[in-house]
Image (spheres, rainbow, N blue to C red):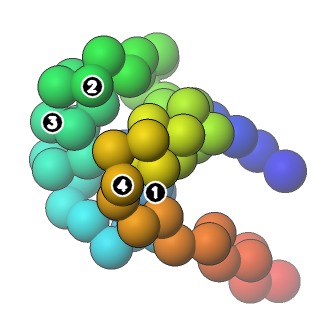
Amino acid sequence: MANHFTPEELAKDLGMDARELIAFCLRESIPIYKGKVDRSLLTAVMRSKGLAVPAPQPAAC
């Protein structure tokens, strides 16, 4: 299972706007490397801040 996603992909999964997600990453010093965000790092930071993190949706076949 992939762990690095574009902000647009993660925002869709988390029910956020991509710009909101990027702003959150910048505010919390979560790196965006080559246009991708580490989902496990993002969710760990969100949990530490007390934010709800929805479970990832399985990919459609």
Kindly identify the residue that appears in the image at 54 percent across and 40 percent down.
44
Residue pointed to by mark 2: 28
Q: Amino acid at mark 2?
A: Glu
Mark 1 falls on what kind of element? Answer: helix
CA distance separating discs 2 and 3: 9 Å
Q: Amino acid at mark 1?
A: Glu
Q: Quadrant of residue 11?
A: bottom left
Q: Tell me which label, 4 or 2, sits earlier in the chain.
A: 2
Q: Label 3 neighbourhood size at 10 Å, few (<14), some (14-19), many (20+)?
A: few
Depth-wise, is mark 4 or mark 1 nearer the camera?
4
Residue pointed to by mark 4: 50
Q: Amino acid at mark 3?
A: Ala
CA distance separating discs 4 and 1: 22 Å
15 left or right of 45?
Answer: left
Q: Which mark is residue 23?
A: 3
Mark 2 falls on what kind of element? Answer: loop
Q: Label 4 neighbourhood size at 10 Å, few (<14), some (14-19), many (20+)?
A: few
Residue 6 visible = no
Q: Tell me which label, 1 or 2, sits earlier in the chain.
A: 1
Kindly identify the residue that appears in the image at 63 percent across and 39 percent down.
40
Residue pointed to by mark 1: 9
Front one among 61 and 27: 27
Please say if 4 is above or below 50.
above
* Quadrant occupied by the C terminus: bottom right
Q: Amino acid at mark 4?
A: Gly
CA distance separating discs 1 and 2: 19 Å
Q: Label 2 neighbourhood size at 10 Å, few (<14), some (14-19), many (20+)?
A: few
